[in-house]
């Protein structure tokens, strides 16, 4: 039996596909520092559990396909703090940010349509866009240039008759790059001039460091008809398992299209929406403390990485990821070696090889992504293991 060409052209996740090696390492008694996945260890706000425990109805029933009104209103109130006037009808609750992206791309793309996105990009964009019949056109960035991409002269030549959207992750995953207000305006103007959708993945909005401003593409009213915001509670509230995200857009046609898909999948989990609505009411001090903690983890990780001879690395401005180029031919080979043949005092480290974060063949083979989601002392030790492991890897004649 033959599988679809779409699924055959997809890749396995570089974030998860090496888990078999880490599981075996842990089975053999090694401690593995997991830098590969953005799973925060920050405590989930207790408001979530308290709200779920307070559910006292006799039947756990279906919710509305567009989500609970309480959660929609909570999200509208949240965005009002950014000067944005959002109504519940503009908010579609989804099963995480992943479903939000999948729904949007399915709704806007025809077979062969193109989406511009800065590479390296969150690897699952390849899956979402390919499944919708689309094609990624990469805006290639480099660590040496600070991963900058919002440059008109760089983007306009990539736009063709099949271009349908510009997709943005801000703050960036995997680079941690944050667009300035001026750079956002460049993308807004291009989208307006070329009649393109602006898909703004803003799930890391709170994680902006060194005094940088938290922003949203929803603040640009001149493109309200084409901006689609993707959001989620996963990272903001350290609630990845809740699987609650949302699509925010004032484009009524898109709202109607997405609703067709939402009705087909029935609804999001009722209890998770109840817990999520409660979390949106947490005191702002929660975000201040979390941001301060991640900023410290970033500093510790970056300082340790810069001790590695030959490393190329930019200090990220936001999110909780950092990209680094190592003096090796293949970070995939290096990772497998770390997990199968190396340890220091019974410990080793795991990261995500970066080739899968690129659409351009051959790029990213000597790069890796680190998620600095562990406490600072663990990030320090894991980065040290990376340095020590690389030294041993080279001593053994590996390239």
Image (cartoon, rainbow, N blue to C red):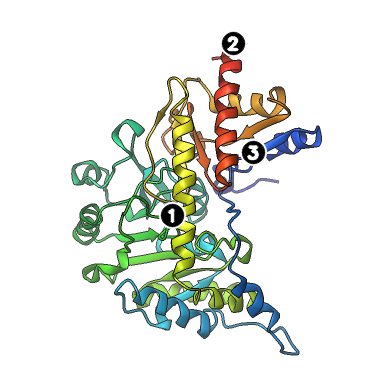
Mark 2–mark 1 distance (CA, rounded to whole Å): 50 Å
Disc 1 packing (10 Å; few <14; some 14–19; many ≥20): few
Q: Is residue 33 above or below residue 126?
A: above
Callout 2 secondary element? helix
| Coordinates of residue 216 in the picture (x, y in percent) | 33, 64
Disc 3 packing (10 Å; few <14; some 14–19; many ≥20): some
Q: Which residue is mark 3?
A: 33
Q: Is residue 346 above or below residue 264?
A: above
Placement of the C terminus among the 4 image quadrants: top right
Q: Which residue is mark 1?
A: 111
Q: Which residue is mark 2?
A: 395
Q: Residue at x 60, y 64 (%)?
A: 44
Mark 2–mark 3 distance (CA, rounded to whole Å): 23 Å
Nearer the observer: mark 3 or 1; the answer is 3
Q: Is residue 60 above or below residue 134?
A: below
Callout 1 secondary element? loop
């Amino acid at each position: 039996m033959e599988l679809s060409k779409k699924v055959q052209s997809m890749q396995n996740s570089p974030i998860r596909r090496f888990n078999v090696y880490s599981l075996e390492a842990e089975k053999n008694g090694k401690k593995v520092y997991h830098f590969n996945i953005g799973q925060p260890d920050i405590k989930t706000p207790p408001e979530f559990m308290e709200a779920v425990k307070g559910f006292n109805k006799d039947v756990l029933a279906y919710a509305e396909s567009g989500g609970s009104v309480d959660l929609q209103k909570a999200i509208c109130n949240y965005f009002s703090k950014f000067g944005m006037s959002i109504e519940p009808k503009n908010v579609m609750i989804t099963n995480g940010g992943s479903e939000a992206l999948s729904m949007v791309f399915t709704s806007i793309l025809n077979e062969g349509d193109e989406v511009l996105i800065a590479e390296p990009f969150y690897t699952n964009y390849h899956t979402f866009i390919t499944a919708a019949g689309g094609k990624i056109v990469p805006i290639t960035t480099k660590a040496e240039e600070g991963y900058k991409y919002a440059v008109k002269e760089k983007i306009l030549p990539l736009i063709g008759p099949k271009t349908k959207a510009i997709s943005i992750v801000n703050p960036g995953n995997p680079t941690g790059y944050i667009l300035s207000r001026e750079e956002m305006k460049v993308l807004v103007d291009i989208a307006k001039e070329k009649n393109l959708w602006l898909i703004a993945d803003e799930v890391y909005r709170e994680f902006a460091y060194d005094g940088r401003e938290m922003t949203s593409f929803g603040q640009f009213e001149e493109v309200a008809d084409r901006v689609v915001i993707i959001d989620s509670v996963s990272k903001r509230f350290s609630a990845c398992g809740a699987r609650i995200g949302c699509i925010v857009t004032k484009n009524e046609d898109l709202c109607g299209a997405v609703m067709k898909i939402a009705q087909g999948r029935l609804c999001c989990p009722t209890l998770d929406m109840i817990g999520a609505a409660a979390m949106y009411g947490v005191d702002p001090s929660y975000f201040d403390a979390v941001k301060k903690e991640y900023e410290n983890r970033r500093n510790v990780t970056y300082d340790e990485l810069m001790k590695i001879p030959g490393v190329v690395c930019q200090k990220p401005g936001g999110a909780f990821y950092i990209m680094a180029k190592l003096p090796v031919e293949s970070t995939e080979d290096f990772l497998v070696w770390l997990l199968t043949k190396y340890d220091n005092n019974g410990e080793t480290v795991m990261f995500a090889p970066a080739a899968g974060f690129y659409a351009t063949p051959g790029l990213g083979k000597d790069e890796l992504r680190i998620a600095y989601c562990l406490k600072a002392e663990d990030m320090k030790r894991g980065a040290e293991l990376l340095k020590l492991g690389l030294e041993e890897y080279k001593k053994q004649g590996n390239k």
